[in-house]
């Protein structure tokens, strides 16, 4: 009888211990890059079940390339493949892409490759195909995208390069695959245009088809369900579009103004009911609701107030859809928030010591 009681007690103690450990075990990770001109590094953070972040790798993980030392005016400087095996990082100062293998509690550099263009600022990957957006910058340079095949070990093989956008110095901001991997979209903030490329079964892109933006300065965007795409606009607004497999874009709603300044980055909730945008100029985040047909409506013009000098830029949603992470370079930190069912956000973590040049944010 006594031995059974002892076993029962130890079973309870063990259950409590396991629950305690699992509550703080790494559920995922968050990554950003320093974009330092003297040597780019990736900062990695383990994400616990309760959303808190723990720094990994003292001083970060060197990319083997360089940044520019200042903001890239981009979305998507880092990308993770669908299987969470590899992290891809742009080195805008050295015109290269770094590939890291994702380990349980660290990163391991696989290789550094040419971006096949000048000043890479955004990268996207779907299955075994990767595309990078090169922002040539100068009038004499070419704003273009380049494609690569990704091997099982993370090595890149060039597929196509120098695929031009609508012109030179168009102010490109982001490149991203749609969920099916047969379309690529690029936003051009200087020309107020949105480029759509079709991608064949071999990963070769063609185009672009160029469409006018609903408002000035299309910047960040995210694909939703049912062939819908949602775009933030520097004018202080967001719009939604439908996109066909043939590469045709048609406006659904917008521009939906939020009354804020320099609306730049945009992410969606996993269920596609909400969108959040960062307003870099006014130091806050706005939220929108999304109807089944893709229509946007303003939910809260100031869903988060991060401070007038906080300079909120990149924003990312964890792959379990429970948390949002926000890079505020003016305040020198990364902030994490729990996502409620009504789209509201509650603070859960803050990481200090982030450099002003830091750019890009991706979560898993």
Image: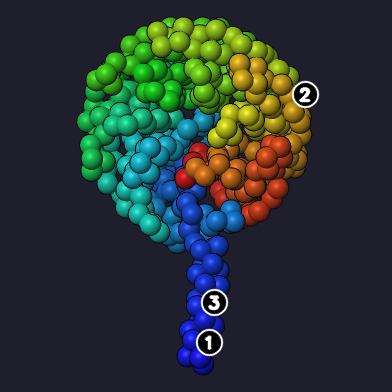
Given contact means CB atoms under 8 Å apart, are the residues at marks 2 and 1 in contact? Answer: no
Q: Which residue is mark 1?
A: 5
Q: Mark yes or no: residue 131 visible.
A: yes
Q: Position of residue 273 (x, y in %)?
A: 63, 29
**Foreground mark, 2 or 3?**
3
Q: Residue at x 58, y 53 (%)?
A: 51
Q: Which residue is mark 3?
A: 12
Q: Secondary structure at mark 2?
A: loop
Q: Position of residue 16 (x, y in %)?
A: 55, 73
Q: Earlier in the sequence, mark 3 or mark 1?
A: 1
Label disc, if present, on residue 259 of the rendered structure? 2
Given contact means CB atoms under 8 Å apart, are the residues at marks 2 and 3 in contact? Answer: no
**Foreground mark, 2 or 1?**
1
Q: Earlier in the sequence, mark 2 or mark 1?
A: 1
Q: Residue at x 75, y 40 (%)?
A: 305
Nearer the observer, 356 or 51: 51
Quadrant of the image occupied by residue 316: top right
Relative side of 6 to 105, left or right: right
Vertical order, 314 against 60 (above or below): above
In this view, the residue farthest toward the front is: 1
Quadrant of the image occupied by residue 266: top right
Nearer the observer, 9 or 306: 9
**Foreground mark, 3 or 1?**
1
Q: Earlier in the sequence, mark 2 or mark 3?
A: 3
- Give me the C-alpha separation between circle 2 and circle 1: 65 Å
Relative side of 346 to 226, left or right: right
Q: Position of residue 6 (x, y in %)?
A: 51, 88
Q: Secondary structure at mark 1?
A: helix
- The local crowd at label 1, few if under 14, some if 14 to 19, many if 20 or more residues have their Cα within 10 Å, is few
Nearer the observer, 311 or 205: 205
Label disc, if present, on residue 188 of the rendered structure? none
- Give me the C-alpha separation between circle 3 and circle 1: 11 Å
């Amino acid at each position: 009888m006594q031995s059974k009681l002892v076993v029962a007690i130890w079973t309870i103690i063990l259950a409590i211990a396991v629950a305690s450990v699992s509550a703080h075990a790494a559920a995922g990770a968050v990554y950003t890059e320093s974009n330092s001109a003297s040597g780019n590094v990736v900062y990695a953070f383990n994400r616990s079940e309760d959303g808190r972040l723990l720094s990994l790798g003292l001083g970060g993980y060197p990319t083997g390339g360089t940044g520019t030392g200042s903001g890239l005016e981009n979305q998507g400087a880092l990308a993770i493949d669908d299987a969470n095996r590899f992290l891809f990082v742009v080195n805008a100062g050295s015109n290269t892409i770094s590939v890291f293998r994702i380990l349980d509690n660290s990163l391991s550099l696989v290789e550094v490759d040419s971006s096949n263009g000048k000043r890479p600022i955004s990268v996207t990957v779907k299955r075994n195909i990767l595309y990078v957006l090169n922002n040539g910058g100068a009038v004499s340079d070419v704003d273009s995208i380049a494609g690569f095949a990704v091997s099982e070990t993370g090595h890149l093989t060039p597929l196509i390069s120098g695929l031009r956008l609508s012109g030179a110095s168009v102010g490109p901001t982001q490149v991203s695959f749609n969920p099916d991997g047969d379309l690529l979209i690029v936003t051009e903030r200087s020309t107020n245009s949105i480029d759509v490329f079709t991608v064949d079964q071999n990963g070769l892109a063609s185009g672009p088809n160029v469409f006018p933006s609903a408002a000035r300065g299309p910047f960040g965007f995210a694909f939703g369900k049912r062939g819908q795409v949602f775009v933030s606009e520097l004018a202080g607004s967001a719009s939604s579009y439908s996109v066909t497999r043939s590469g045709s874009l048609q406006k659904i709603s917008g521009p939906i103004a939020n009354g804020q300044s320099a609306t730049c980055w945009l992410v969606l909730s996993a269920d596609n009911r909400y969108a959040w945008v960062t307003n870099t100029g006014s130091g806050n985040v706005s939220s929108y609701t999304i109807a089944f047909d893709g229509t946007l409506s303003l939910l809260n013009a100031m869903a988060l107030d991060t401070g007038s000098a906080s300079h909120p830029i990149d924003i990312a949603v964890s792959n379990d859809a429970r948390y949002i992470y926000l890079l505020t370079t003016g305040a020198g930190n990364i902030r994490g928030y729990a996502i409620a069912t009504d789209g509201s956000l509650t603070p859960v973590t803050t990481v200090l010591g982030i450099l002003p040049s830091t750019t890009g944010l991706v979560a898993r």
